[in-house]
Image (cartoon, rainbow, N blue to C red):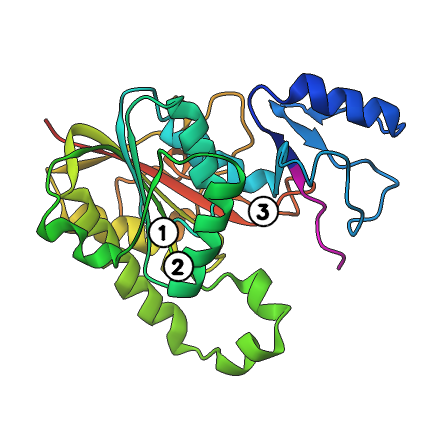
Amino acid sequence: MAPHKPILRIVPGAEKTLKKLWKEAGLPWKTLDWYKQALVWPEDVSIKTALPGKDEFLFYPMNPSSLLPVLALDPKPGEKVLDACAAPGGKTLMIAEALKGKGELLAIDQSPARIHRLREVIKNYNHPEVLVSLKDSLEMFRSNQGIFDKILVDAPCSSEKHVAKSAMQMALWSPNRPKQLHTRQVSLLCGLSMCLKPGGRMVYATCATTPLENEAVVSKFLKKREGKMRLVPISEVLKDKPTGPGMKKFLDEGINPDDITRIWPRDHKGMDPMFIAVFEAGA
């Protein structure tokens, strides 16, 4: 199956210049129905084409599914935000733009190669205010408890779509990998939840399809942090956006599958798989 063409998220303030470049190139200007700051890739243009505005960093290409975790996080100017698994940087840029230079954004990743890529993205899109650091998210709780308003956990996951396209990744994959990732994902949420201020919000997202890394993680985390974290219904944070229910049979009793969301390519045209759950720290 051919890869989905990305949308082009327009950099704030660049719309006028970008629209002029596209008009000169004879390209249609069409924005995403549910997110007007993103251009739809022109239908008859190859995905390999360098579109006007690319070299000037007037837009950032990403799959529309990847917009949803940041929209659910809803960062606001003045807040202190942690992007806990930040590379390659598309979601980090969205958060930085939402903060409008007011507040604080710490973007971390434990991979030196991925951190290098993240730093390049931050530099190219001119956000020197973003603090980028090589850190393991599992260690953050040791010295950062109760300090963040918002935390995005775009967690390392099986990412079956990407694994299937890579011979090297397929060779490394094993049935134990989702189990290992499940354990790490639960640990990430438990540790990072301690870094939230009372009433703070944490968004958990993966591009995995296996329930072990999605619904089962939500159930285990809420059990471990019972009374300290609550699940926020997705309808409260992603109004008028593409959503779909979680898988009930993999959730503990009492957890409503409609309160989390799954994006399936079969149900959402042009969108890659995505799972999202939103949590809030108790007062």
Q: Position of residue 31 (x, y in %)?
A: 70, 24
Which quadrant of the figure contains the N terminus?
bottom right
Determine whether, in the image, residue 137 is placed left or right of residue 65.
left
Residue 264's disc is: 3
The disc labelled 2 sits on which kind of residue? Pro
User: In this orientation, which residue lies closer to the viewer: 55 or 279?
Assistant: 55
Q: Which segment is the magenta one?
A: 1-7
Q: Are marks 2 and 1 in contact (CB under 8 Å)?
A: yes
Which quadrant of the figure contains the C terminus?
top left
| Mark 1 or mark 3: whose residue is earlier in sequence | 1
The disc labelled 1 sits on which kind of residue? Cys
Residue position for label 2? 156
Of circles 2 and 1, the one toward us is: 1
**Can you tell which quarter of the image residue 82 is in?**
top left
Find the distance from the CA under tag 1 to the CA under tag 3.
Answer: 23 Å
Question: What kind of element bears circle 2?
Answer: loop
Q: Position of residue 62 (x, y in %)?
A: 60, 43
